[in-house]
Image (cartoon, rainbow, N blue to C red):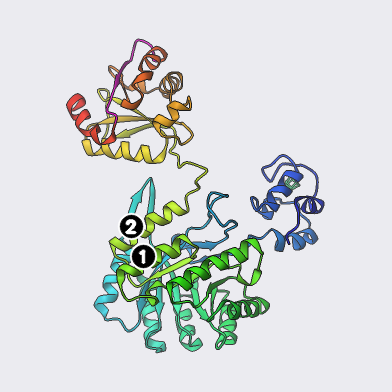
Amino acid sequence: MGLTGIQIFQLLPKTNCKECGVPTCLAFAMNLAAGKAELKQCPYVSEAAKQKLAADSAPPIRTVEIGTGKGAFKVGGETVLFRHEKTFVNPAGLAMLLNDDEPEASVAGKLKRFKELSYERVGLTLKGNAVAVRAAKGDKAAFGALVTKVKAETEGGIILMAENPEVMAEGVKACADRKPLLYAATPDNADAMIALAKETKLPLAAKASDLEKLSALTDKLAAAGVQDIVIDPGSREIKKALHDEIHIRELSIQKKFRQLGYPTIVLPFEMTKDPMMETVYASMLLAKYAGIVVLSDFRGHNLFTLLLERLNVYTDPQRPMKTEQKVYEINNPGPGSPVLATSNFSLTYFIVSGEIENSRVPTYLAVLDTEGLSVLTAWAAGKFVGDALGGFIKKSGIADKLKSPTLVLPGAVAIISGDVEEELGSGWKVVVGPKEGAYIPAYLKQNFAQ
Ligand code: SF4
């Protein structure tokens, strides 16, 4: 059992200096107990207290970082079973498999797709995280050569897949500075893999045929000093794989079962040969609760689907995605351009700004901070109303850039036009625009094309 907030409080300095971001040591202790804070946020904890608290305040699932620089990604670190309880922290890594016995053209095509498949959504860039290089031939030179090529051509993370420690060592030699994940230590090769991971300080995957053997294996790794562990429960049938993922998460979170408190790696391509079913399985495992999903290939239709699912699963449901409140310039607006108004709910902002871009009509877009609520919800909550919108437009100073300022309100809130007009004063013309984003291009072309 973990320490309670009061027990943690007894170990803190009790100076209430506020440097951890909360007003008192007691509040910080309560946050630590609830997994909402990290011990390192308090710079004054004594070494003795640190040792006592570190193990207890660590997330029940260890955070493991793979890769370096732009290609680095973290997995694990989760503290809840369901995203509505708090939020999921580190999005699952998506990796693409490359075998060292694949024809050159296939390797080149896959690497090209790995680099090029990238999507912009709600202001974020969505793309795969890593290339998993598998020693299919069992040949040191072939493995090392492919790892070298992957390292030279990509910035992403690298997962080295070899169960022969000598072959693995060749891959490590080629890319140790990129902090690859070593996959995998098994009950048969554990000693050699532990030695390699300890020598290079690289994260190590542990793979066994069931959860009991896996727990014994992670125990052995941890006792030998390997801390950054990713686990593969070995299940290669989807029902069992899903069951194992859920069981591992429940044991880690609810029972604080440290032996399985690590992010997982799943290989749906070993569960089916059908590419469509592989994507379906990947989707199920991504939702519950895979840390890394390795796909046999990246194609637009499988990767995009999984990236969007990941975005949804790992978005904090308690905090709407928000855009910064400001007046955005789209299509190089000038003194004769209109000002469209909208809320700062990211999805609304990106739909509206996308439609304005499509229209090619130079336009200003005034985005009001509505705490991430969409226009109509914000109006109902009293946040997208005349004085708030009018006040923001006045403060922004946008009127100084315009010849005859015109503000276009979203059609859904035509009701506030009188209030906005009153707030802005006589210098402004306030009109009501379309109710749906899809009608914005036609509306702008018809009314404001220059
Ligand atoms: S930084 Fe440490 S000492 Fe200061 S208030 Fe927070 S917990 Fe207390």
Q: Residue furthest top?
A: 426
**Residue beneath disc 1:** 280
> Magenta span covers which residues?
424-435
**Residue beneath disc 2:** 118
Q: Which callout, 1 or 2, points at the residue further toward the start of the chain? A: 2
- Nearer to me, 351 or 273: 273
Density class for disc 2 (Cα within 10 Å; few <14, some 14-19, many ≥20) is some
Residue 255's disc is: none
Answer yes or no: is residue 155 visible: no
Density class for disc 1 (Cα within 10 Å; few <14, some 14-19, many ≥20) is some
Residue 60, relative to residue 434: is it above or below? below
- Amino acid type, callout 2: Ser
The residue drawn where x is 39% and y is 77% is 270
Q: Nearer the viewer, mark 1 or mark 2?
A: 1
Residue 431 belongs to the span the image colors magenta: yes
- Amino acid type, callout 1: Val
Residue 222, relative to residue 17: is it above or below? below
Q: Position of residue 354 (x, y in %)?
A: 29, 40
